[in-house]
Structure formats: structure tokens, C-alpha cells
Image (cartoon, rainbow, N blue to C red):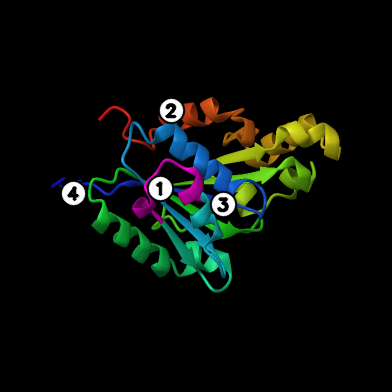
């Protein structure tokens, strides 16, 4: 039987508006990291377990390592104000898989005021997409300003939706200061290598253990 780690697994929170690519980001991280780390994944939806079912169908992670949480209300509450449902889900997965090194936790659809409780996650990735408009970064808000990493996703759509990536870059720098942001098109894997490099550089993962 695998012994339980003596330290808490690294917890990575993923937030963003509905349709921005949170579940795709979760899938790509699983694909990139599953051979190196013992992973579990949690999805949050208000009334369904659709994202959990998507991961079970499409990822190489075994179904027992994926758990869907139905929050039944504001998704912000379950990641910031009363995180008990997610803490219970994490404990459930750790009981099943005591060798877990990394917990990937996807929020439900969030607006720009979303943040994760620091007691729930160790690092917070917020994802937006160009189809929401190139004005999104300059709208600011806690998610844009204070997430550990901002991902601007679906860059391949920019010419088709009239989004100016240079404007989004300028405004992201203005809003975030020294905090990192990346342009990605996760469906086609563009930017994924840079994302993994960021995780390594920031040492959120036990890469050299």
C-alpha cells in the first residue's frame, strides 16, 4: 500500500468565466503532468457534474481520481467564502489516493471578482478568452489583478472576433504589474509549454523531489 505523503499535496485553483476554457485547461494539465505526478482533479458546477463527466471521457486520468462538486449556488462561495464542500472533496480523493502530489481544482463559472481562499489552494490561475472582448483585462477586478497567473485563451479566434492581442497585452501589463500572464490556444496546445515552464519556475510543483 502506498504511504500517505507527509506534506500536503500542492493545490492549484483554476477560475474563469463560463466558456473561457477552464475544463480544457484542466484537461491539458492532466495530459502534460500525469506521467510525472500523482494527480487528482475536482470540478465545481452549480447544478451539474458535466465537467467531471467530460474529464472522465476525455482524460487519461482514472475516474476514481476525478470528482465533481455541485455547489448549488454562487460558485465564488465554494472557493472563497465557505470552502467546506471542496475540502471534503479533497479529503475524499486523498483517502482514495494517498499518494496524491497535486490537486487540480476547477471552479464554476466566475466573474472578475472571483478569488480562491488561500486556505483552499496554493496558487490561482485565472483564464479568460478573446471572444469575451479585448477590453476584459482593463476591466480589472481581483481575478485579473491578483491571480498568480492570467491566461488569455483562444488566441486563434482573435482575428474572427475583432480582438486586438496587443491591446490585451498592454492592459494586462497595466493591471497586473509584475504578475505573469500568458497567451494560449489550449484546444490546439499553443502556450501549454509556457504554462508548464511557469509552474516549474514558480516551484508550485515538487518537480525535483
Dot 3 crowding, Cα within 10 Å, few <14, some 14–19, many 20+: many
Q: Is residue 132 visible?
A: yes
Q: Is residue 146 visible?
A: no
Q: Residue furthest bottom?
A: 72
Quadrant of the image occupied by residue 95: bottom left
Dot 1 crowding, Cα within 10 Å, few <14, some 14–19, many 20+: some
Magenta segment range? 55-66
The mark lying in front, picked from 3 and 1, is 3
Q: Position of residue 108 (x, y in %)?
A: 57, 60
Q: Is residue 137 left or right of residue 77?
A: right
Looking at the rendered structure, the secondary structure element under dot 4 is: loop
Q: CA distance from mark 3 to mark 4?
A: 28 Å
> Label 4, on which residue?
4
| Residue in view at x 59 percent, y 28 percent | 191
Circle nearer the N terminus (2, 1): 1
Looking at the rendered structure, the secondary structure element under dot 1 is: loop
Q: Is residue 94 left or right of residue 49?
A: left
> Label 2, on which residue?
201
Circle nearer the N terminus (3, 4): 4
Amino acid at each position: 500500500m502506498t504511504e500517505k505523503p507527509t506534506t500536503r499535496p500542492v493545490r492549484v485553483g483554476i477560475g474563469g468565466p463560463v466558456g473561457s476554457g477552464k475544463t480544457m485547461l484542466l484537461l491539458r494539465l492532466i495530459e502534460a503532468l500525469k506521467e510525472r505526478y500523482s494527480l487528482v482533479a475536482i470540478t465545481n458546477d452549480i447544478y451539474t457534474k458535466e465537467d467531471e463527466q467530460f474529464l472522465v471521457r476525455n482524460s487519461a486520468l482514472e475516474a476514481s481520481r476525478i470528482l465533481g462538486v455541485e455547489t448549488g449556488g454562487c460558485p465564488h462561495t465554494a472557493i472563497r467564502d465557505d470552502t467546506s464542500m471542496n475540502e471534503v472533496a479533497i479529503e475524499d480523493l486523498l483517502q482514495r489516493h494517498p499518494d496524491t502530489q497535486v490537486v487540480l481544482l476547477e471552479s464554476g463559472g466566475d466573474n472578475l471578482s472571483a478569488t480562491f481562499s488561500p486556505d483552499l489552494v496554493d496558487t490561482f490561475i485565472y483564464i479568460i478568452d478573446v471572444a469575451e472582448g479585448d477590453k476584459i483585462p482593463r476591466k480589472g477586478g481581483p481575478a485579473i489583478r491578483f491571480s498568480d497567473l492570467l491566461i488569455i485563451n483562444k488566441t486563434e479566434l482573435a482575428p474572427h472576433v475583432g480582438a486586438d492581442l496587443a491591446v490585451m497585452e498592454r492592459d494586462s501589463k497595466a493591471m497586473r504589474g509584475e504578475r505573469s500572464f500568458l497567451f494560449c490556444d489550449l484546444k490546439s496546445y499553443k502556450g501549454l509549454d509556457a504554462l508548464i515552464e511557469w509552474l516549474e519556475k514558480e516551484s508550485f510543483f515538487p518537480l525535483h523531489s
